Image (spheres, rainbow, N blue to C red):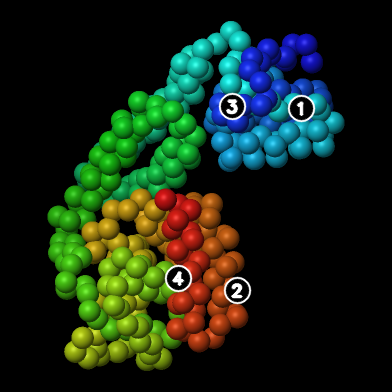
């Protein structure tokens, strides 16, 4: 592996080593495996220091990523060595951090270009259909933004520009909805202190909506379940995710998304959960969230194990707390 070696200064005894170096050699065949390794390294955010030598900042998560990849390379008949170093000869720390920033800046710039290309939904009759397609693309842009942000170890300057471009696109999509007479009600006292009524046999949208209500909108919310297709609310009651409810599906949005909008909640992690809930509840791939199949399987198991609605809300809330923490 002479073409892949690097000289590492510093002692292994230092606990504050800064860099992880993966030095590998992959068999020429099969071709797909070489491509697979290259793509995995890109998704980790690793940069190529030289031929077959990739580097990441030394952290628990990056160490785990490199270790898994090392095992896979060796299992396929290749060779791999993982080093931890404080200094790498021939390059300064600033230069190395600049390499990471340059790669992230290029990815942020691609996001800006994509967002700007979608920023004008058009006028004319086809605007509504085109806007729906743009919203789906916007979901993918947000997901890509999260992926790049997770790899942005040194705060690339292009991040702010990408955030502005996506925010501008969101604002342009929001204006036509508001001009068309969307609900004026926002979060506040009018959404608090209620008994929230919904249909029995709660599932993904109602479970997630109940969690959102109690966690972020109405901390003292009480929940009531009815088997009736329609329900006339009593004093102090509001309905959600049911026929003629105060909070339910609006347009192509699920109830969770409606609650987010009406409460004025801008949290990016909540928006991501809304996209997951939408894809499961509406049985489409508008946002293409990779978490959706796993969450759908979890909710199916929860529904089978717990026929009682209150218990489903309790168990679902614990899972959604963990999902929210992960997405933040």
**Which residue is disc 2 drawn over?**
301
- Name the mark nearer the viewer: 4 or 2: 4
| Residue 79 percent across, percent down from the top left | 80, 26
**Which residue is disc 3 drawn over?**
17
Q: In this rendering, is residue 38 above or below 91?
A: below
At mark 3, the secondary structure is: loop
Q: In this rendering, is residue 312 above or below 58?
A: below
Q: Are marks 4 and 2 in contact (CB under 8 Å)?
A: no
Residue 320 shows which numbered tag? Answer: none
Specify the quadrant of the image occupied by residue 226: bottom left
Residue 317 shows which numbered tag? Answer: 4
| Residue 302 percent across, percent down from the top left | 56, 75
Nearer the N terminus, badge 3 or badge 1? 3
Q: Residue at x 44, y 42 (%)?
A: 146
Q: Residue at x 56, y 36 (%)?
A: 59
Q: Residue at x 47, y 31 (%)?
A: 153
Q: Quadrant of the N terminus?
A: top right
At mark 1, the secondary structure is: strand
Nearer the N terminus, badge 3 or badge 4? 3
* 10, 183: nearer the viewer: 10
Residue 80 shows which numbered tag? Answer: 1
């Amino acid at each position: 592996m002479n073409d892949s070696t690097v000289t590492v200064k510093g002692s292994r005894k230092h606990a504050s080593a800064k860099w992880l170096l993966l030095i590998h050699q992959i068999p020429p065949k099969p071709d797909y495996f070489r491509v697979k390794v290259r793509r995995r390294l890109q998704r980790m955010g690793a940069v190529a220091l030289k031929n077959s030598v990739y580097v990441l900042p030394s952290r628990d998560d990056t160490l785990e990523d490199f270790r898994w990849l090392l095992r896979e390379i060796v299992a396929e008949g290749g060779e791999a060595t993982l080093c931890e170093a404080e200094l790498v000869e021939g390059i300064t720390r600033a230069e190395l951090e600049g390499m990471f920033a340059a790669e992230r800046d290029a990815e942020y710039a691609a996001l800006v270009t994509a967002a700007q290309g979608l920023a004008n939904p058009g006028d004319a009759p086809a605007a509504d259909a085109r806007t729906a397609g743009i919203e789906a693309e916007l979901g993918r842009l947000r997901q890509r933004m999260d992926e790049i942000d997770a790899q942005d170890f040194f705060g690339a300057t292009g991040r702010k520009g990408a955030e502005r471009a996506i925010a501008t696109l969101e604002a342009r999509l929001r204006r036509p909805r508001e001009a068309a007479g969307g609900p004026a009600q926002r979060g506040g006292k009018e959404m608090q202190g209620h008994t929230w009524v919904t249909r029995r046999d709660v599932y993904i949208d109602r479970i997630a909506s109940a969690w959102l209500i109690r966690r972020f909108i109405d901390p003292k919310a009480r929940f009531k379940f009815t088997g009736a297709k329609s329900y006339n609310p009593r004093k102090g009651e509001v309905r959600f995710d049911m026929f003629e409810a105060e909070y339910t599906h609006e347009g192509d949005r699920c109830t969770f998304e409606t609650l987010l909008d009406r409460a004025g909640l801008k949290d990016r992690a909540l928006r991501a959960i809304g996209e997951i809930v939408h894809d499961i509840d509406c049985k489409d791939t508008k946002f293409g969230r990779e978490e959706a199949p796993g969450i759908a399987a979890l909710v199916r198991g929860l529904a089978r194990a717990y026929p009682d609605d209150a218990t489903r809300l309790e168990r679902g809330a614990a899972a959604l707390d963990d999902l929210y923490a992960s997405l933040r």
